[in-house]
Each structure stands twice: as C-alpha cells, then as structure tokens.
Amino acid sequence: MNMYIVFLLQLVIWSLFSLVEWRSAHDHLIFKALLFVIFMYVAFLLALRFRLTKKRACWTTLLTIAVYFVCRQLFWAYRL
C-alpha cells in the first residue's frame, strides 16, 4: 500500500517538474539537468519518508521516472 501511495505522489512531483521545466524554457541544459537531479532526489527522499527500503525506494523512483517520460513522449507524439 505504501508503494502505491509513493508512486502516485512521485508522479505529482514529476508533474511539478514538468511545470518548472516549462517555466525555465530558456535555461541552459546544465541547469535543466541539475533541476532533474534535484527533483529525483526529492522523489527518492519522499519514498524513504514512507519507510520504503533504500533499494525499493530507488526502484520506485526509477519506475516513476520511466512512466513519466514515456507518458510525456506519448502525449507530445499524439496530441491534436
């Protein structure tokens, strides 16, 4: 149950990342990469806060990142 809640909350974090990335459209790539790392770390800390093990928190974070980027690509590929 905790992992499901963490998964949903991490998707909210990645949605916020998308909003912040959109607002910083003219920034250099290095700053966008740094922003990505910060959001990834916050998502990982959230998973640890819900008492997931470090291994499970890492895998959950990587899974939500993958789901986020796949859905983002599908959205931009098939938008009308």
Image (cartoon, rainbow, N blue to C red):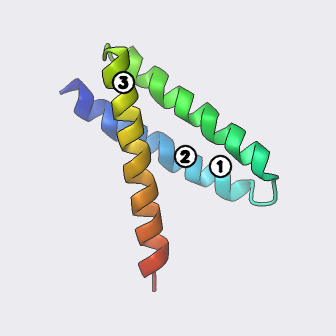
Q: Identify residue for label 3.
A: 57
Mark 3: few, some, or many residues within 10 Å (few <14, many ≥20)?
many
Say whether disc 3 or disc 2 marks the residue closer to the N-terminus.
2
Q: Residue at x 34, y 33 (%)?
A: 60
Q: CA distance from mark 3 to mark 2?
A: 19 Å
Q: Could you tell me which quadrant the C terminus lies in?
A: bottom left
Mark 2: few, some, or many residues within 10 Å (few <14, many ≥20)?
few
Q: Provide residue 41's location: percent of width, then percent of height.
A: 55, 27
Q: Is 55 or 11 nearer to us in this picture? A: 55
Above or below 15: residue 73: below
Q: Identify residue for label 2.
A: 16
Residue 20 image label: 1
Looking at the rendered structure, the secondary structure element under dot 3 is helix
Q: Could you tell me which quadrant the N terminus lies in?
A: top left
Looking at the rendered structure, the secondary structure element under dot 1 is helix
* Amino acid, disc 1: Val
Q: Residue furthest left?
A: 1
Do the CB atoms of the residues marked 1 and 2 lie less than 8 Å apart?
yes
Q: Residue at x 46, y 26 (%)?
A: 44
Looking at the rendered structure, the secondary structure element under dot 2 is helix
Above or below 13: residue 59: above
Q: Provide residue 57's location: percent of width, then percent of height.
A: 36, 24
Q: Provide residue 31's location: percent of width, then percent of height.
A: 77, 44
Q: Is 35 or 9 nearer to us in this picture? A: 35
* Amino acid, disc 2: Leu
Q: Horizontal placement of 15 versus 64: left or right? A: right
Mark 1: few, some, or many residues within 10 Å (few <14, many ≥20)?
few
Q: CA distance from mark 1 to mark 3?
A: 24 Å
Say whether disc 1 or disc 3 marks the residue closer to the N-terminus.
1
Q: Residue at x 75, y 60 (%)?
A: 25
Q: Is 15 or 53 nearer to us in this picture? A: 53
Q: CA distance from mark 1 to mark 2?
A: 6 Å
